[in-house]
Image: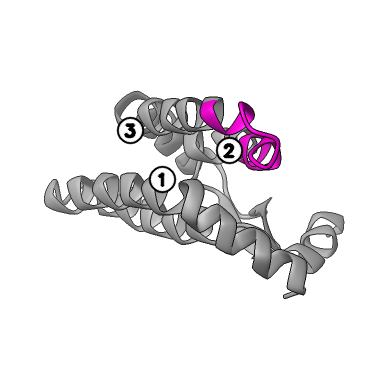
């Protein structure tokens, strides 16, 4: 991890990372309680870790993800994804109001697609992201 990524991650954690990670953890807890949705809870915890410390990492599509991931993502959007995406949107608005917050506002908006469709994606270091996409 580069020093700039470390600084960005610390600032991110202070301004919005902790709150969004808590939202994903709550979604995971609800999924674990409902038992049948445990795979969604695992995905929510994975994203919570990513949302907590995003700089220097990226997401890539899994090659083995197929129809079950698509169906799972549709169910996820209906029950949890939309309010997590709304959380990213609402969090980005005050960040855009300050000069230092603009990059973090954009980062929040970039997290909306994974908050809507988390299944069938892996979180990898940024330097491996391009390599994983080329395969």
Say what secondary structure mark 2 lies in: helix
Q: Which residue is painted at 43% across and 25% down in the image?
A: 86
Q: Residue under circle 3?
A: 80
Using residue 23 as the reference point, say whether residue 60 is left or right of it: right
Q: Distance between the residues labelled 1 and 2?
A: 9 Å
Q: Which residue is painted at 68% across and 42% down in the image?
A: 100
Q: Is residue 56 magenta?
A: no
Q: Residue under circle 2?
A: 108
Closer to the camera in the image, 56 or 8: 8
The quarter of the picture where residue 75 lies is: top left
The numbered mark, 3 or 1, whose residue comes first in the sequence reads 1
Q: How crowded is mark 1: few (under 14 residues within 10 Å), some or many (20 or more)?
A: many
The numbered mark, 1 or 2, whose residue comes first in the sequence reads 1
Say what secondary structure mark 1 lies in: helix
Closer to the camera in the image, 67 or 5: 5
Q: Residue under circle 1?
A: 20
Q: Quadrant of the N terminus?
A: bottom right
Q: Give the range drawn in magenta.
A: 94-107
């Amino acid at each position: 991890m580069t020093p700039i990524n470390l600084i960005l991650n610390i600032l991110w954690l202070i301004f919005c990372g902790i709150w969004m990670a808590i939202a994903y953890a709550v979604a995971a807890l609800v999924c674990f309680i409902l038992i049948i949705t445990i795979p969604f809870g695992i995905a929510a915890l994975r994203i919570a870790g990513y949302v907590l410390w995003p700089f220097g990492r990226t997401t890539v599509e899994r090659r083995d993800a197929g129809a079950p991931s698509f169906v799972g993502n549709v169910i996820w959007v209906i029950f949890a994804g939309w309010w997590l995406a709304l959380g990213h949107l609402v969090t980005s608005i005050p960040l855009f109001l300050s000069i230092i917050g603009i990059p973090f506002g954009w980062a929040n908006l970039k997290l909306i697609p994974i908050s809507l469709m988390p299944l069938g994606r892996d979180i990898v270091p940024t330097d491996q992201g391009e390599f994983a996409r080329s395969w």
